[in-house]
Image (cartoon, rainbow, N blue to C red):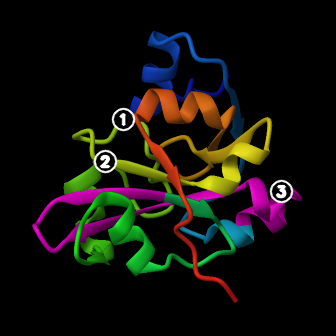
Amino acid sequence: MAKEVKTNAIRILDREKIPYQLNLYECKEFIDGVHVADMLSQPYECSFKTLVARGKTGGYYVYCAPIKEELDLKKCAKAVGEKSVELIHVKEINSITGYIRGGCTPIGMKKRYPTVLHESALKYPQIIISAGRIGAQIFMNPNDLVRVTGAKTFDIILKN
């Protein structure tokens, strides 16, 4: 019998009685969200990655964007009222969030940071985010994600 997966994110969703579906897949090390979506035949537009940035004031901010898109850091700064933000270095992910690269989720980080979800998420009945570890995903309603993280929605991606 496989060991039950319980991450901080899953514990919080269970405690708050927020519906979700857990999807486990075989993956030994980090691969980016696009490769995961390809491997699992999932649509890019409702698969979201979680990125963390530091603002000019020193505060941390969490951004969730479609996996195939790139953040527009000027829009990201505007969304949180900062002059500028820059993405944190990969080495800092665990110490800041409590999660690792490829398993970072906006739910249940070490601290509750201001969170911004790309506005496109609200077009879908459910989106896919990391469950807080490599090889685990959460399918959930984006409005529930907004509620549990206190996120706001904003256009935070680069336009082609």
Q: Nearer the viewer, residue 18 or 117?
A: 117
Q: Nearer the viewer, mark 1 or mark 3?
A: 1
Query: Which residue is tagged 1?
Result: 108
Q: Which label sits on residue 10?
A: none
Query: Which residue is tagged 2?
Result: 114
C-alpha gap between disc 1 and disc 3: 25 Å
- Mark 1 surroundings: few (<14), some (14-19) or many (≥20) residues within 10 A: many
C-alpha gap between disc 2 and disc 3: 30 Å
Q: Position of residue 144 (x, y in %)?
A: 58, 27
Q: Position of residue 73 (x, y in %)?
A: 40, 79
Q: Nearer the viewer, residue 4 or 32?
A: 32
Which quarter of the picture shows residue 22?
Answer: top right
- Mark 3 surroundings: few (<14), some (14-19) or many (≥20) residues within 10 A: few
Q: Position of residue 39 (x, y in %)?
A: 82, 64
Query: Which residue is tagged 3?
Result: 40
Residue 105, magenta (yes or no)? no
Residue 14 versus residue 95 in the image, above or below: above
Q: Position of residue 72 (x, y in %)?
A: 48, 79
Query: Which region of the structure is painted magenta?
Result: 36-63
Helix, strand or loop for disc 2? loop
The residue type indicated by label 3 comes to Leu
Residue 113 versus residue 27 in the image, above or below: above
Q: In the drawing, does residue 86 fall left or right of residue 143? A: left
The residue type indicated by label 2 comes to Pro
The residue type indicated by label 1 comes to Gly
Residue 54, magenta (yes or no)? yes
C-alpha gap between disc 2 and disc 1: 12 Å
Q: Is residue 7 visible?
A: no
| Residue ID at (49%, 27%) | 147
Q: Nearer the viewer, mark 2 or mark 1?
A: 2
